[in-house]
Image (cartoon, rainbow, N blue to C red):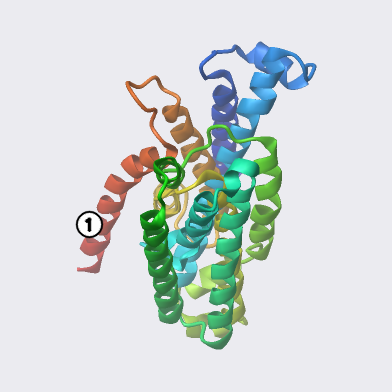
């Protein structure tokens, strides 16, 4: 077994162990045999309700969302050739947040909780369509970054406007708490809603590894090797936008995962842009599941939110990456 395959297998086993541990830990701690009995038990059994209806959706979403953010971050850093690029740079995360905030402001979540992810996904798809229009005319890296920053700025300003217009303190609190990110109280309906979009985004980015490796030595070299640069950028940008939009639509604002994970993978496994996609997905699932476990720790006052934990982990790592990048550019 190659070193690369061995590392991926180790990450997969680590992710499985953490996922099982996440099923055992909560307000009511359970041992592993009880967890497996709950997964297979009768639907009316209290243990089955705790495991299958409360904890399993949370674990599945943690793995899927972490993987979506990790893969998207690695692909975007490769295609934009920028080590500081992350899914937020294309403006989809902010657009999804805008959709969710509008749903809360209109009171739609009271009648149908699934309206929040539906509106969030609508905002993400709108940003994706705009990126698609721009990339079909001008797929240059600079243009994609500028358009992404523009979309993110407009969406952030619109979020501030909606929050400013909100007259209900409860609505305002719900908006703030949603933007902080959480996997608490998620159901299998959220999983069923997000999974098709996340998988579709991954399918769009399938087999882009060779193109990313060729692109790392320059666009002209990649073109001489028969790589369609415009199509490569289009597949990665649209695929990342759809998968990240679906992820944000069900968990809220979770930052830094897509930025930090690819750098961790490069340091631990390999540095080839095309070969870090899979391990970035596995590492992203590990990080987000661990972060969700940290939100369940007993805390005085309000429990930690998922986005707060990832920011506390990611912000120092981001500063380290910035200084390290500056040193290598000297």
Residue pictured at 53% horizontal, 82% vertical: 134
Q: Is residue 243 visible?
A: no
Residue 151 x, y percent position in the rendering:
44, 71
Tag 1 residue: 323
Q: Is residue 328 visible?
A: yes
Residue 146 x, y percent position in the rendering:
40, 77
Residue 22 x, y percent position in the rendering:
55, 25
Q: Nearer the viewer, residue 294 or 44?
A: 44
Q: How many marks?
A: 1
Residue pictured at 69% horizontal, 25% vertical: 52
What is the quadrant of residue 81 in the picture? bottom left
Q: Nearer the viewer, residue 201 or 115?
A: 115
Q: Is residue 112 above or below residue 262?
A: above
Query: Regarding mark 1 in the picture, which secondary structure is present there?
Result: helix
Q: Residue furthest front?
A: 167
Residue pictured at 45% horizontal, 60% vertical: 94
Q: Is residue 71 above or below residue 26?
A: below
Q: Nearer the viewer, residue 232 or 120?
A: 120
Disc 1 residue crowd, few under 14, some 14–19, many 20+, Cα 10 Å: few
The quadrant of the rendering that contains the N terminus is top right
Residue pictured at 57% horizontal, 27% vertical: 17
Residue 3 x, y percent position in the rendering:
54, 45
Q: Nearer the viewer, residue 139 or 225?
A: 139
The quadrant of the rendering that contains the C terminus is bottom left
Q: Residue furthest bottom?
A: 137
Residue 247 relative to residue 265: left or right: right
Residue 198 relative to residue 91: left or right: right
């Amino acid at each position: 077994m190659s070193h690369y395959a061995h590392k991926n297998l180790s990450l997969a086993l680590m992710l499985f162990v953490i996922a099982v541990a996440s099923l055992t830990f909560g307000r009511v701690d359970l041992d592993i045999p009880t967890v497996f009995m709950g997964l297979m038990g009768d639907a009316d059994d209290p243990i089955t309700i705790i495991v299958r209806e409360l904890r399993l959706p949370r674990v599945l979403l943690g793995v899927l969302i972490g993987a979506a953010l990790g893969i998207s971050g690695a692909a975007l850093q490769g295609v934009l050739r920028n080590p500081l690029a992350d899914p937020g740079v294309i403006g989809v995360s902010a657009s999804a947040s805008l959709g969710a905030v509008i749903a809360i402001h209109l009171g739609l979540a009271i009648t149908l909780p699934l309206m929040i992810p539906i509106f969030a996904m609508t905002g993400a798809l709108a940003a994706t369509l705009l990126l698609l229009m721009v990339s079909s005319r001008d797929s240059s890296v600079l243009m994609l970054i500028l358009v992404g920053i523009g979309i993110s700025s407009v969406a952030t300003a619109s979020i501030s406007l909606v929050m400013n217009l909100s007259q209900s303190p409860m609505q305002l609190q719900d908006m703030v708490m949603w933007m902080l990110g959480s996997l608490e109280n998620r159901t299998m309906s959220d999983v069923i809603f997000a999974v098709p979009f996340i998988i579709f985004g991954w399918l769009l980015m399938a087999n882009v590894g060779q193109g990313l490796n060729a692109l790392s030595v320059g666009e002209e070299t990649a073109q001489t090797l028969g790589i369609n640069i415009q199509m490569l950028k289009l597949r990665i940008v649209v695929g990342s936008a759809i998968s990240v939009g679906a992820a944000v639509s069900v968990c809220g604002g979770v930052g830094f995962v897509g930025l930090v994970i690819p750098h961790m993978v490069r340091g631990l496994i390999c540095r080839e842009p095309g070969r870090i996609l899979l391990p970035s997905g596995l590492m992203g699932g590990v990080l987000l599941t661990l972060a969700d476990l940290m939100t369940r720790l007993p805390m005085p006052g309000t429990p930690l939110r998922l986005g707060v934990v990832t920011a506390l982990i990611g912000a120092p790592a981001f500063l380290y990456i910035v200084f390290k990048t500056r040193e290598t550019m000297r």
